Image (cartoon, grey):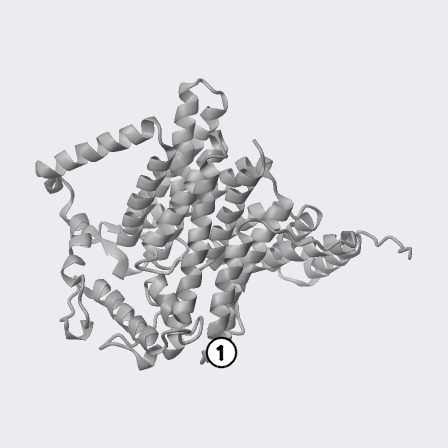
Amino acid sequence: MAFFPLPKFHTLTLPAIITATAFALAILPLKLAAVALAGAIGVTVVLVRPKLGLYALIFAIPFSSLFQVSFGGANVGVMEGLLALMLGVWLMQMAARREIVIPHPPLLYPLLVFLAAIAVSWLGALSFSATLSETAKWLEMLALYLFIAANFSAADAHRLVGALLLAGTAEAAVGLYQFVFKVGPEGFLLFGGRFLRAYGTFRQPNPFAGYLGLVSPLALAILLWAVDEFRRKKAESLFWLGLSGGALAILLAGLFASQSRGGMLGFAVAAAVTILLMGGRWLVAAALTFIGGALFVSMGGLALIPARILQRFADALPYIGVSDVSTIAITDANFATIERLAHWQAARGMWRDHLWFGVGFGNYAAVYGAYAVGRWTDALGHAHNYLLNVGAEAGLVGVLGYVAMWLWVIGFGLWGLRRTAGFRRAVVVGSIGIFAYLHTHNLFDNLYVQGMYLHIAVIFGLMTLVKTNSE
C-alpha cells in the first residue's frame, strides 16, 4: 500500500508560531512582547534543530527557579517547556518518517528496574498526586536519557562537557556574588556578618552546593587529563586546561561559600574517587598528599584552619548514634543537625511500619504528621537522607531497586574505563566521581530536586555516548 509523503512537521508549525508571535507583539506590553519574541525564536530553533535544545536545557537546569510559575500545585517553567518541546519534536520527527524507534541504551534497564520497584508502592499511597509528581521525575530522566542516546554521538561529547562546565561556573558565580555582597536572608549571614552563605538560584545553600558538586568532579577529571596532555605538548589541551581549571576554581569557591557540610564531604569523597580512577602519576600525587595531610594533622596543623569551619563538622559528632532526638536540648549550634536526625527518625518509623512497600512513593510529606518527632512538625518535603527516604516511601522493594540500579550504573562505568582513552576516559571518570558525590551528599539530603535529576540524566547520556561509540 502506497503512502503519500507527509510534509515535514515544522512546515506546518512554523507558520502558526510566526502568526502567534506577530499577534503577541501587537497586543502585549513591551517587556512581555520581548519575552514572547525570545520564546518564539527559541521554539523555532529547537523545532529545526532539536539537539540544540539539550544545550539550552543544561543551562536552564540550575536557573529553572527564575523562570517558572505554579500550576496545579506543580512548578512549570522554561526547563519543563524545553524538555517537553525536545521530546515532542523528536517523536514528531519519527512519526513524519513513519518509523518510531525507541533506542535501548545500556542504562535503560536499570532505570526500568527502579521504576518497577517504586510502582509497587503506588497501591498504598495516601496522596496519589504526590506519587505521580515524584514518579514523573524519574520518567523525565528516562525520556531525556533516551533522547540523548538516540540523537547524540561521541562526537558531541566535547560540546556537552563544555556546556556543563560553563553552566556550573555561571551558577557558582551567582553564589559568590551573594557571598561577597551579602545578598540574601539575614539568617544566612556568616563570620560575624562579614559574608553570607551562598544559595545561588536554589533558595537554600545545600541544594546549591549539591548542584556544584554534581559538576566539580567532571571539571577535576578533565583538568587532570588536560595537564597530562599539556605535558605531551598537545595543542587541544590549552583550551581544556583553561576551561576546566577556571571552572573548578570557581566551583570550589562557590562550594566553600555555601558552607554546606554535605557538599564539602561529598566533594572530598568524589575527588578521592576521581583521582584514584585517573591513576598514573595522579595516584602517586594523591598518596603523597594523603601522607602530607596526615603529617600536617599530627603536628597540630588543624589549629591553622579557621575554628568556624572546623566547628561546622564538630557540632554534628556528639549526636552520631542517637536513637531518639526528642530528648535532646536544642541550641543554635545543634539546630540543623537535630532537625536532620528528627527526619531520619521519622523516616525509620515509616519504613518500620510499612516494611515491604512503604507509604507510597513521594508520600513522605503526606504522612509525616503521624511520625513527626518533638517540635519538628514541618515535613520539609523529604527525609534528608535519600536512601531512608526511599525506604520510607517504597519500602524494602524500593530500596533494593534503587541499590540495584546504581550498582548497575556504576558497574557499567567501571567496565567502560578499560574501553575508553584520553578525553573520553576522563569523561567516564568524572561521571563516576559525580555519582560518588551524589551518594555521599544524599546521605544528608535529597539532590533529586530543582532539575538536578535531569542533570543526572545528562551525565548518564554523556557516559553512555563516550563508551558505546568507538574512539
The residue that disc 1 covers is 123
Q: Looking at the image, which residue is at 40% across and 77% down? A: 366
Q: Looking at the image, which residue is at 38% across and 33% down? A: 278
Q: Quadrant of the C terminus?
A: top right
Residue 235, percent across and down? Answer: 49, 20
**Which amino acid type is shown beneath numbered disc 1?**
Leu
Answer few, some or many: residues within 10 Å of disc 1's Cα (few below 14, many 20 plus, some between 14 and 19): few
Q: Looking at the image, which residue is at 63% across and 54% down? A: 86
Q: Nearer the viewer, residue 146 or 250?
A: 146
Q: For numbered disc 1, what is the local secondary structure?
A: helix
Tell me: 125 left or right of 266. Answer: right
| Residue closest to the far left | 299
Question: Does the image show residue 183?
Answer: no
Instruction: Give the mark count.
Output: 1
Q: Quadrant of the N terminus?
A: bottom right
Residue 301, percent across and down? Answer: 12, 38
Residue 342, percent across and down? Answer: 25, 70
